[in-house]
Amino acid sequence: MAELSHIANEFIRQEIDEFLERPEEIERNIELFSRVRPAMQDIAAALIEGDDEEVDRLTKQALDEGTNALEVMDDGLIAGMGIVGIKFREAIIFVPEVLACARAMKAGMKHIEPILSESGVEPVAKVLMGTVKGDLHDIGKNLCIMMLRGSGFEVVDLGVDTSEDEFIDALEEHKASILGMSALLTTTMPNMGKTIEALIDADLRDDVMVMVGGAPVTQEFADDMGADGYGKDALSCVSLARKLAEEGA
Ligand code: B12
């Protein structure tokens, strides 16, 4: 069994020791960081500290040294954001600190994006992606977009706070075959269902496959609101989009 002392980075050890209280979260993070390479732990630590310049430098360095972009994304950036999320929930840090961490995440993603978006093949399908109305979280959506582009999808990014009408107008304009919605708040999740209802009202539901995701979203919720698929992370977003592109064709 992994132990705290197996984690090389002292800052990460302290963060887990000092701020994590739920046994399952302590165990999950010790397990995660003890298998993660020290260079990735350093990226996670810089992200937790909200140090965008350091994340920028370390991410570039790791990629230059040949580390796989997905490893940097999962084991460095997303792993660090996991701790930020817990500290935010427990009111150990507040919105300004989380914004600094989000800025640091973006500084790292800037280097990863061109690598993951390189595909040079004919688009598999066109996807519209947006965070739903009332919701400003875009990190997860942007990761999904990066991975989709890297896997040969053409993606139109509708940004955050996307209303039902904006989804519909974009669908009519771009004639995409897949529509992806992201929500990070339990209060904005129902807006996914509202968008699906609006698609039905506009007589467009049969023209598009709908996929949904975001931390609070579940398969059950997706089924209940009538989506065609749910993906738990950026990798499953890509496999789901592939499946929906085939089914919709
Ligand atoms: C960063 C962050 C912020 C930043 C957002 C910056 C940005 N540009 O995105 C800021 C500071 C602005 C923010 C604000 C708020 N936040 Co906030 N935030 C977070 C935090 C810490 C991390 C989210 C994140 O980026 N995760 C990392 C990414 C990689 O993961 P992800 O988004 O889940 O995406 C992955 C998957 O879900 C999936 N996915 C995502 N979208 C899609 C779409 C499809 C189609 C598919 C297939 C897959 C998929 O793939 C992604 C990649 O693997 C979370 C905590 C958490 N653990 O989620 C809280 C959290 C989401 N926020 C929360 C809250 C409460 C708020 C505020 C209301 C706080 C406030 N009092 O003002 C505001 C709301 C603002 C608004 N109107 O949206 C709560 C939500 C609670 C709830 N149950 O509703 C959380 C859970 C924190 C908490 N535990 O309390 N936040």
Image (cartoon, grey):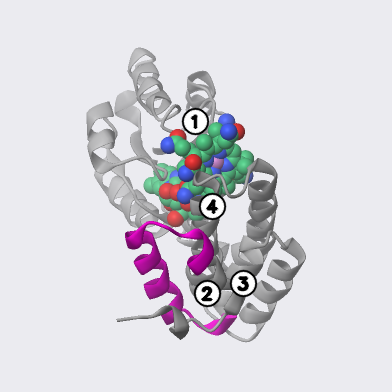
Q: Is residue 133 left or right of residue 186?
A: right
Q: Kindly state the secondary structure of the residue where label 3 is placed.
A: helix
Disc number for residue 87: 4
Image position of 160 with respect to 115: above or below: above
User: What's under tag 2, amino acid-wise?
Assistant: Arg
Instruction: Say which residue appears at 34% left-offset and 61% top-offset.
Output: 23
Q: CA distance from mark 1 to mark 3?
A: 30 Å
Disc number for residue 22: none
C-beta proximity under 8 Å, tags 3 and 2 = no
Report the residue marked by disc 3: 43
Q: Nearer the viewer, mark 4 or mark 3?
A: 4
Instruction: Say which residue appears at 28% left-offset and 51% top-offset.
Output: 243
Q: Nearer the viewer, mark 2 or mark 1?
A: 2
Q: Is residue 20 magenta?
A: yes
Q: Is residue 156 left or right of residue 177?
A: right
What's the magenta bit mostly, secondary-structure-wise? helix
Report the residue marked by disc 1: 132
Of the image marks 1 and 4, the number of the one nearer the N terminus: 4
Q: Kindly state the secondary structure of the residue where label 1 is placed.
A: loop
Report the residue marked by disc 2: 13
Image position of 1 with respect to 187: above or below: below
Q: Nearer the viewer, mark 1 or mark 3?
A: 3
Query: Residue 162 is drawn in which quadrant?
Result: top right
Query: Magenta residues, as a range?
Result: 16-39
Image position, residue 7 (x, y; %): 48, 81
Image position of 119 with respect to 2: above or below: above
| Residue 156 seen in render | no
Of the image marks 2 and 1, the number of the one nearer the N terminus: 2
User: What's under tag 3, amino acid-wise?
Assistant: Ile
